[in-house]
Amino acid sequence: MASVPSVSYSITVRLEVPAGGRAVSQITHVVENAGGIVTALDVNTAGHETLRIDVTIATRDTQHAEAIASALEKIDSIKIHKVSDRTFLMHLGGKIEMQSKVPLRNRDELSMAYTPGVARVSLAIARNPEDVRRLTIKRNSVAVVTDGSAVLGLGNIGPEAALPVMEGKAALFKRFAGIDAWPICLDTQDTDEIVRTVQILAPAFGGINLEDISAPRCFEVERRLRELLDIPVFHDDQHGTAICVLAALTNALRVVGKDIGSVRITMAGAGAAGSAILKLLMHAGARDLIVCDYRGAVHKGRDDLDDSLRWIADHTNTAGYSGDLRGAVKDADVFVGVSAPGILNGDDIATMNEDAIVFALANPEPEVSPDEAREHAAVVATGRSDYPNQINNVLAFPGVFRGLLDAQANGVSQGMLAAAAQALAEVVTPGELGPNYIVPSVFHPDVASRVAGAVREAAGGRPRTEA
């Protein structure tokens, strides 16, 4: 897919130009000829002879931004003062901060917030540990934990490089659900060390959000922590993705008039996200599924099955298909990809059943070009923001944790995940539902509250269960 100018690579160029003449139109012309898009132009200072202006430009990538800056520099009578990368500017000094909720204006307030008054609160919690949720930040706090081993699509880049992503996650928790989330980036990729570290940090938090931990280690980390802790442990790469996919598929099936129990579903990707999607789809009633990884279809006859792949082989592909992904897609009603870019093309989608549904979620490059897929499929979704039907985890995790915290839940069940998916699907009203609108915008005002309410209700009074 050819990249297009994006705000992710936008720059602001500060220029000094003559006060009269055609300087502004020249700037716009040069940027457009170079393939950029001028998104804003602001006068910074004005004089009789010169103007200092800030021109904001969307570009395709870093090299494209440098080429546009060089082209502007060649315009006669224009001087470049500074070129700023807007994304890096946003991250300077980090994106989140801690603020006090109580005033500390005088000695009285200090004495209640801290010593000696705080000692009374500590003793009350020591006498009744359940009061920790009522009297501390635990009731509204989530740890966002990573080892930096599978960050976005960047791979194993380590804990320091993962920190900007975890900060962003924390900012989303606050923006969409009012939750205080804290980035915890661990300098270890040893399963035992990760589990023990999270276990001893857990008393300060009401929930644990595991993030960007590679498979298969992430499965064991999650399983062991759920056994050890009395607070919810939620792996967003698995369960957040699964919720969003089930919600989107629920509505896509409504569009084409098919039922989840009768459609054939082919999946590409058997890692963390793929496994969780598979299990939640099966919980929702899916019966006819084939899962493929880089070696082709997962089936009982393969000699490379670990525990996770063995589970998939035992619960899917009842006909024992042993071919490749292209063969598995033929005659399927639904394709769900959480794998690698460009592994299918439009001709492959053409072999699917009529009114096919394609979820190509590899990001930023999907498994199949959305434009090619749209020529043959009735509904197409991606993980990208520049196409309709973006399946984005921010639709799920803020509301899920809001509901878990409000219910003071001590675990996460498949029933809770399914309830979240159903609530998310129902945000799209029957009058709005269509091939290009199967999931709401992440900024829809009802998303987090509806998901939170469904999770809270599903968690109410339930014993601890495993997802």
Image: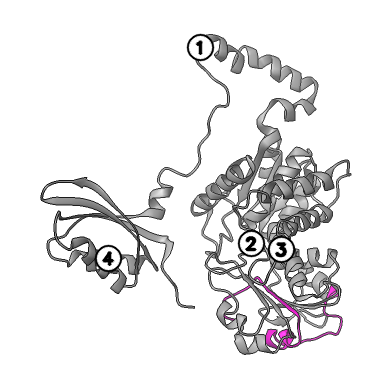
User: Which range is magenta?
Assistant: 314-343
Q: Which residue is mark 4?
A: 28
Pointers 2 and 4 in contact (C-beta within 8 Å): no
Mark pair 3, 1: CA separation: 56 Å
Q: Which mark is residue 106?
A: 1
Which element is circle 4 on?
A: helix
Q: Any magenta on residue 360? A: no
Mark 2 / mark 1, whichever is N-terminal = 1
Closer to the observer: label 3 or label 4? 3
Which amino acid is tagged 1? Asn
Query: Which residue is pictured at 55% across the width and 69% down the height?
Result: 387
Residue 97, image x and y in percent?
A: 50, 37
Mark pair 2, 3: CA separation: 40 Å
Closer to the observer: label 2 or label 1? 1
Which residue occupies the extreme front position in the image?
431
Q: Which residue is mark 2?
A: 214
Residue 376, image x and y in percent?
A: 65, 85
Which amino acid is tagged 2? Ser
- Seen in the image, is 226 located left or right of residue 361? right
Mark pair 2, 4: CA separation: 45 Å
Closer to the observer: label 2 or label 4? 4
Q: Residues within 10 Å of mark 1 (few under 14, many from 20)?
A: few
Q: 88 above or below 93?
A: below
Colour mode of the rendering: one colour
Mark 3 / mark 4, whichever is N-terminal = 4
Which element is circle 3 on?
A: loop
Q: 45 above or below 440?
A: above
Q: Which residue is mark 3?
A: 431
